[in-house]
Image (cartoon, coloured by chain):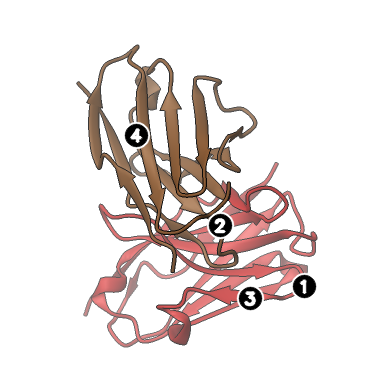
Chain colours: A red, B brown
Amino acid sequence: QVTLKESGPVLVKPTETLTLTCTVSGFSLSNARMGVSWIRQPPGKALEWLAHIFSNDEKSYSTSLKSRLTISKDTSKSQVVLTMTNMDPVDTATYYCARINAAAGPDFDYWGQGTLVTVSS
Amino acid sequence: DIQMTQSPSSVSASVGDRVTITCRASQGISSWLAWYQQKPGKAPKLLIYAASSLQSGVPSRFSGSGSGTDFTLTISSLQPEDFATYYCQQANSFPSITFGQGTRLEIK
């Protein structure tokens, strides 16, 4: 059974750095053509893709947020970590991690439950 | 970046109705399109991938079609559990991914 679970702070202050962890089970981060992505959704708004990381450690970032994002993985711990610097209230959102299946769509076939991050002083 | 535009933004329908949601890409994306369903407070769920392939476990009343720039998601006979928000997602510019703005399907 494939599962993903996000963890991290629920509240961050403006200008701080956000660090989120996605812990996966039911598949390995070393699986070819599988990766993990981060996607966010501000309250009442649409989904926004942020970043991917794949088994070969290839990484990709949203063009608009690239300068603020870093994605990494620890295969032995089955964890993917996203950091976002210089947080602002407009970054308040539910942050999801999802498995990206590059052998299919590519598309996001399994999602975590999401974690709501509020940016406020 | 490729822009994805969904229409309508919201639609009201009744149980048993046939509903069609449209997604248009700002440039051709072949068949690199997926559809998701999202219920309040829940993560999105993959319904359709590669424009017309039904994800395992998804009811057959859901279907997708289209290629190039114009795509549709059709629900043949609405069930109470289908009232949700639907998103399209393009992967033609993979690894860059973009989503549509969503279509809210409400009970009439």
Q: Would you say the residues marked 4 and 3 are in contact, meaning their CB atoms lie under 8 Å apart?
A: no
Q: Which mark is residue B84?
A: 4
Residue A59 vertical position relative to residue A104 in the rendered view, above or below: below
Amino acid type of the residue that numbered disc 3 sits on in the rendered structure: Lys
Name the one closer to the observer, A87 or B100. B100
Amino acid type of the residue that numbered disc 1 sits on in the rendered structure: Asn
What is the CA distance from the residue labelled 3 to the residue labelled 1? 9 Å
Q: Do the residues at discs 1 and 4 belong to one chain?
A: no
| Mark 1 or mark 2, whichever is nearer to me | 2
Residue at the disc numbered 1: A56
| Mark 3 or mark 2, whichever is nearer to me | 2
Query: What chain letter is assigned to the residue under label 2?
Result: B
* Label 3 secondary element: strand
Side (left or right) of B33 relative to A40: right
Query: What chain letter is assigned to the residue under label 1?
Result: A
At horizontal 24% and vertical 75% (from top left) the residue drawn is: A89
Amino acid type of the residue that numbered disc 4 sits on in the rendered structure: Ala
Residue A34 vertical position relative to residue B60 in the rendered view, above or below: below
At horizontal 79% and vertical 59% (from top left) the residue drawn is: A31
Residue at the disc numbered 3: A59
Query: What chain letter is assigned to the residue under label 3?
Result: A
Q: Residues within 10 Å of mark 2 (few under 14, many from 20)?
A: many
Residue at the disc numbered 2: B91
